[in-house]
Amino acid sequence: MLQLPLLVTAQLDLVLVLVSLLSLWTRLSRLSYPSSVVFDEVYYGQFVSLYMKRIFFVDDSGPPLGHMILALGAYLGGFDGNFVWNRIGADYPCSVSVWSLRLLPALCGALCVPLVYLLTLELGFSHLSALGAALLLLLENSLIVQSRFMLLESLLIFFVLLAFFSYLRFHNAHSRSWSRYSWLLLSGVSCAAAVGVKYMGLFSYLLLLGVASVHSWNLIGDQAVSHLSVFIQCVCKVLCLLVVPVLLYVFWFYIHLSVLNRSGPHDQLMSSAFQASLQGGLSRITQGQPLEVVYGSQVTLRSSASQPVSCWLHSHKANYPIRYENGRGSSHQQQVTCYPFKDVNNWWIIKDSGRQELVVDTPPRPVRHGDVIQLVHGMTSRLLNSHDVAAPMSPHAQEVSGYIDFNVSMAAQNLWRVDINNREAESEVWKTILSEVRLVHINTSAVLKLSGVPLPDWGFGQLEVVAEKLPKGHSSSLSWTVEEHRYGTSQGRKEREAELHSPTHIDVDRKISFWSKFMELQWKMLTVKQEESEHKYSSAPLEWITMNTNIAYWLHASTNAQIHLIGNPVSWGVANLSLLAYQLLATVYMLRRRRGLKDLTDGAWQQFVSLGVVCVGGWMMNFLPFLLMDKTLFLYHYLPALCYLYLLSPALLEHVYTHLF
């Protein structure tokens, strides 16, 4: 029977409420000041604008979730993306809600303080230690500064702390409580979010996986736990901490690619198939193109390599010099290069080597894997040729030319075999945009290749194309993709030149799958690095420990008001002393335990070890990798590692007071 009255009993930690309110006040008050671009807001703001306009971009610094969170804040504030992020200190117009741009990073930064409080409790320490850790984060001015602007570090730290808190909450909960698995799921989601904001989150994620693995191994050896319970817990850990983060990581990219469906400034880093899937840009040119390459097709051939630049197979009415500056001779035939711009001289005609016609038959005869073809330059009618003459800039490879018969006993060698790298069958048809082909020279078995070396003035600075024998492994510089394609209908040269400006339209659906786009984008992010220059505020990792560096974030033009990223010297020193003290104390403990002298009970020793694994291990995982990195680094890269030390300091002090004094 229902008993009246209905009562609800709740416990409220007033200290937790107080530090949470103080954290919100320090991070959110006067958030719109200064109303101008501050330091890296000029960098991240560009991506926010591109999100608002749904324009595709590639950011080699990390995954897209962080940018999407910043863009969400901008969207909630009604930002339309029409602001030029061209310099630090530029004033935001009245139409831009500065508060909403900075809201989500500030909110995540504020929530880090109560999370540290709760995480300290889950590590088994007192409320007083939890308060000490929360105060260290609350009063750390570098964390306050980093949280109050449109930057990513506060998002990263929030998700890392949430992941560890959720996992320890799961681990410490009663084993018979099924609701505890919701904490395990939240931990996996937080890990995926941390890695999705910045790849730095991977360091903490690996640490958490290590902790979970040790706990699972201990669970397997616990004879008091049933086989079924062990199996369920291990399977749930695999699902929540491995499968869920991987699926969510892919999901971040799915949202990213679904939103950014318009052509943008980074298109040329991607393959022709990827570019054609975007609205505008290449898709406007390739819309309605024939799918199958046939004899008589007029095509442009784009190198599959993205570095140094994207370019197309090209020729023009200029010959190789008779002799190069180093005294080597050439064939003096027509130059063949790779040109990084759209040009009418990029057009080539696929010719049947046994026929003279340069037009498409009725019905069209498709070119298949293994077919032998000739390539005729559209504007000069020269056949693509190679021979045993050293290339101008790469003498180990063969020269590639447009053949001219000078009647000097140099016969034409202009037959090429089509090898489709990504074919699904041996009789695969050569397809526009989708097929990556290698053109193998019949006479010498050399492969048409972009060397990427710029030619001297006689080559107009265009990129060298060579034919190389026995290439070592697959390389994108050996592959070519048909990008623009039309069916040729004119046999005469003048009519053909005019035809090159009149594409044939045949409606063909050429959609690239999400998985293909995801893998290509992921590979580009990991391999295509923008040129980095030394920054006046960059620093070395060892300078972070001693706080021998800072960053000037903003300077008012008239009042000389300034914002600097610099640490609190008191808390910074306490953190360093705690790190040193823990290592010394751990060394003494282990030596004495080795001699059979146990200074701590098993429970206290386990608590001490757990503190070191999470805090000292977290610091090492988030600091030591930077010593090996060859990239421009800044003080804010140290902030995730610093938070682990702020967790360590009060807890270690409590341990010393409780067990040594």
Image: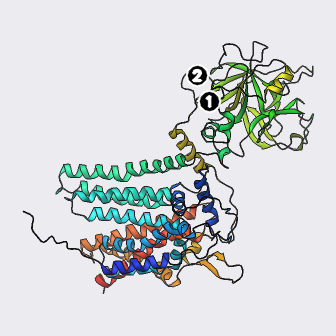
> Hey, what amino acid is under mark 2?
Glu
For the view shown, which residue lies furthest in the bottom direction? 661
- Measured as percent of width and height from the top left, residue 208 is found at 39, 60
Residue 124 as seen in the image, left or right of residue 114: left
- Measured as percent of width and height from the top left, residue 507 is found at 62, 27
Give the label on residue 25, or none. Answer: none
Could you classify mark 2 by the number of other residues whose Cα lies within 10 Å: few (under 14), some (14-19), or many (20 or more)? some
- Residue under the point 74% across and 24% down: 444
Q: What SS does tag 2 mark?
A: loop
> Hey, what amino acid is under mark 1?
Ser
- Measured as percent of width and height from the top left, residue 267 is found at 65, 45
Residue closest to the eye, 615 or 76: 76
Residue 259 as seen in the image, left or right of residue 207: right
Q: Mark 2 and mark 1 in contact (Cβ < 8 Å)?
A: yes
- Residue under the point 34% across and 52% down: 240
Residue matched to label 1: 435
Residue matched to label 2: 428
Quadrant in which residue 22 is drawn: bottom left
